[in-house]
Amino acid sequence: MTATRWLAEYAWLPDHAEPTADVLIETADGRISAVTPLAGGSGVDTGVEVLDDAVRLPGLTLPGLANAHSHAFHRALRGRTHGGRGDFWTWRDRMYAVAQRLDPDSYLALARAVYAEMALAGVTCVGEFHYVHHNPDGTPYAEANAMGEALVEAAAHAGIRITLLDTCYLTATVDGEPLAGPQRRFGDGDALRWAERIDAYRPDDDHVRVGAAIHSVRAVPAGQLATVAGWADRHAAPLHVHLSEQPAENDACRAVHGCTPARLLADRGALGPATTAVHATHLTSGDLTLLGDAGTGVCLCPTTERDLADGIGPARRMADVGLPLSLGSDSHAVIDLFEEARAVELDERLRTRRRGHFSAAELRDAATVGGHATLGWRDAGRLAVGARADLVTVRLDSPRTAGVPPVGVWFAAGAADVTHVVVDGRTVVRDGRHLTVDVPAELTAAIEEVTS
Ligand SMILES: [Zn+2]
């Protein structure tokens, strides 16, 4: 692979509160090999010669954004569930209807388009919380991991990395009701068979990692939580879990187990530094302490949490007790990490009626290095020598960003302002266009296939 020199009008370097002007970034073999702020401005008294061969990146260049929580097929529901009343549970019935329609081919087509939409939004890595494992009647495909393989292939087509968070989903309720109807295809029977299935999947591509997920305390019996956690531990893999998204989950857990979901996970060995709690919206003070003591991270999904009327998680208190934060677009009502990031701050303002809870650098870190770390890519998400060569450039001359200082992008920019995306040294998006996927056309066709 050839080396490339990139000349960023602005770049946001690690440990800097604000972006730096005129930065030369050199990449080779998929890694950042040099980062040189040109203090005198590009081409003037810089001491760096031959800038003519550098690819110019007008605007602000960020590290790669990580979308740490995705269910790719939920994208098919965008705009279809927003008119009526209802709640999380009525939305879930609509979501199951789409899940019923998927097969490995249709899921590949849909996920490829969705991941390409993510690439256009500056996402260089996705955490796919994957639970549609089997045929609709619950019988395995001839290739037991066919659906997961489709997702991994889709990410390769879209040019982004993926952590396939293979999800254990065994029961319908906290008190152990069996899976029925549309949920049957999610289940492996028990946690040992779940582990056997994913042990049989050994992808060797550079763009994929396999992690584990516990769907929720509704879906994995207490006695089997340790099996899933143990698998993640043995493989040094990330472990993700939906936690306390809804008060009803907390109520059911207390009724059956006499404790909160966080306490149940902690008691069964499922909370640790490799664990990420997704949502964590309805936590008690004791739950926050448990997560903090365990070094567990939290993935916030504010646009989904507001879309599903979940509530507002205690984001500032999480950060204050040291929980590493990451962001996900989850149901893909919106795919825009800028919107997720500013929502963390803005939702906190709505709750407290005060402004100024998170710094711009904290929001940047949640969207970049924090998200990559929670997905097991600790060498990504920073514009630093040795890191993966992910570059995301945001224009500063669009109707949304014109006149905005670079530090203000988290409150002004949107996915549509991303112009250039490089993943592991390869250009995936140039001038706002995905180089290999016609995103609108492929989304239209793939969604038609699973909804008509
Ligand atoms: Zn989710």
Image (tube, rainbow, N blue to C red):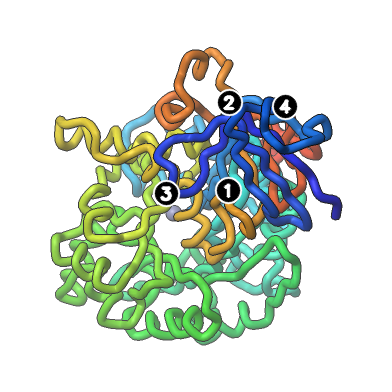
Q: Pinpoint residue 53: horizontal percent, then vertical percent.
A: 83, 34
Sequence-wise, which precedes: disc 3 or disc 2?
A: 3
- Residue for badge 3: 366
Hey, what amino acid is under mark 1?
A: Leu
Q: Pinpoint residue 303: horizontal percent, then vertical percent.
A: 40, 38
Sequence-wise, which precedes: disc 3 or disc 4?
A: 3
- Residue for badge 1: 383
Task: Work out how far the residue at label 1 is from the one at label 2, CA to CA, in angstroms.
Answer: 20 Å
Task: Work out how far the residue at label 3 is from the one at label 4, CA to CA, in angstroms.
Answer: 26 Å
Hey, what amino acid is under mark 3?
A: Ala
Q: Residue furthest right?
A: 2
Label 3: state its secondary structure.
Answer: helix
What is the crowding at mark 4: few (fewer than 14 residues within 10 Å), some, or many (at least 20)? Answer: some
Task: Work out how far the residue at label 1 is from the one at label 3, CA to CA, in angstroms.
Answer: 15 Å
Task: Work out how far the residue at label 4 is from the one at label 2, CA to CA, in angstroms.
Answer: 10 Å
What is the crowding at mark 3: few (fewer than 14 residues within 10 Å), some, or many (at least 20)? Answer: many
Question: Looking at the image, is mark 1 or mark 4 nearer the viewer?
Answer: 1
Sequence-wise, which precedes: disc 1 or disc 4?
A: 1
Choose between 10 and 449: the one closer to the eye.
Answer: 10
Hey, what amino acid is under mark 4?
A: Asp
Q: Residue at x 81, y 35 (%)?
A: 50
- Residue for badge 4: 431
Q: Residue at x 40, y 46 (%)?
A: 301
Sequence-wise, which precedes: disc 1 or disc 3?
A: 3
Identify the mark at residue 417; answer none if there is no mark. Answer: 2
